Image (cartoon, helix red, strand yellow):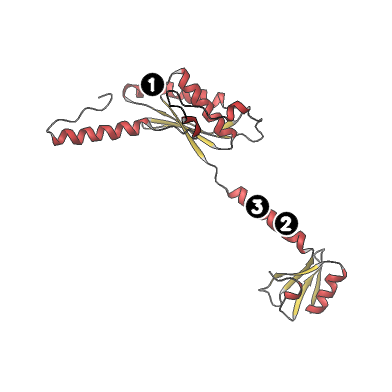
Amino acid sequence: MRVNDRIRAREVRVIDPGGVQLGIMPVPDALGRARELGLDLIEVAPQATPPVCKIMDYGKFRYEERKSQRDAAKRSRQVELKNVRVRPGTDEHDISFKIRNAQRFLAKGMKVKCTVIFRGPEMRHPEIGREKLLRVARECDPYGEVEASPRQEGRQMHMVLTPRPNAPPPPAKLLKKERPPGAPAGAEEHEEEDHDEDEDEDQARSRQAVQGERHGQAPAPADGT
């Protein structure tokens, strides 16, 4: 963007600070008009014939431009998604820990995907998993709201929580990372995100099946079969 003496055209179409077109004039005359007002001559449409220049405060113009760019970047920034996984049989201590994690993620402006994983006979009672998810939603209500209601897909049921606008400031204790139940000392130093136990079990089952085939053994049956 060219300003003042850096404008190369001989003539330009000039717009005053109020948006009124002053017509086409030589650049020295346009510069004189701008300096009389204590402002700058800024080339805003160099591709036009002749180029279009506007009389304005260049410092203020640059400030507004940078502010618009920052606002656009904020709007386009993707929200980080965290995962919290539970089982229909997750005990009270563990689910309380996972709910506090979800609250902490939401308080930090992250979305939370809550997942219940069913195995074998647990598939017969999806209402138990749904109630687990609804409990998470209720206890996270000060910091987040439901973006996607509980929905079952195969042996998993998902729900998505999104940060609540203008949520109250969380207590300092909530923002402090906790050690997962049964984890060694120092585990709280890492941002907790639930690990998919079923993936590990599936991988282990596959390895056992392969090893069994090598030794002429039948593969072990899956849960609930």
Which structural element holds mark 1?
Answer: loop
What amino acid is labelled 2 in the image?
A: Glu
- Give the answer, above or below, for where 118 lies relative to 34: above
Q: Name the N-terminal-most of marks 1 and 3.
A: 3
What percent of the width, then of the height, locates residue 84? 47, 31
Write down the residue under mark 1: 125
What amino acid is labelled 1 in the image?
A: His
Spatial CA distance of label 2 from label 3 is: 10 Å
Q: Residues within 10 Å of mark 1 (few under 14, many from 20)?
A: few
Q: Nearer the viewer, mark 1 or mark 3?
A: 3
Q: Residue furthest right?
A: 36
Write down the residue under mark 2: 64
What percent of the width, then of the height, locates residue 152? 41, 31
Q: Nearer the viewer, mark 1 or mark 2?
A: 2
Which structural element holds mark 3?
Answer: helix
Which quadrant of the figure contains the N terminus? bottom right
What percent of the width, then of the height, locates residue 71? 66, 50
What amino acid is labelled 3 in the image?
A: Arg
Q: Name the residue at 61% across, 48% down.
A: 75
Q: Name the N-terminal-most of marks 1 and 2.
A: 2
What percent of the width, then of the height, locates residue 142? 62, 27
Write down the residue under mark 3: 70
| Among the 4 quarters of the image, the one containing residue 40 | bottom right
Which structural element holds mark 2?
Answer: helix
Q: Name the residue at 20% across, 36% down.
A: 210
- Taking 91 as reference, is 59 left or right? right
Residues at badges 1 and 2 in contact (C-beta under 8 Å)? Answer: no
| Among the 4 quarters of the image, the one containing residue 103 | top right
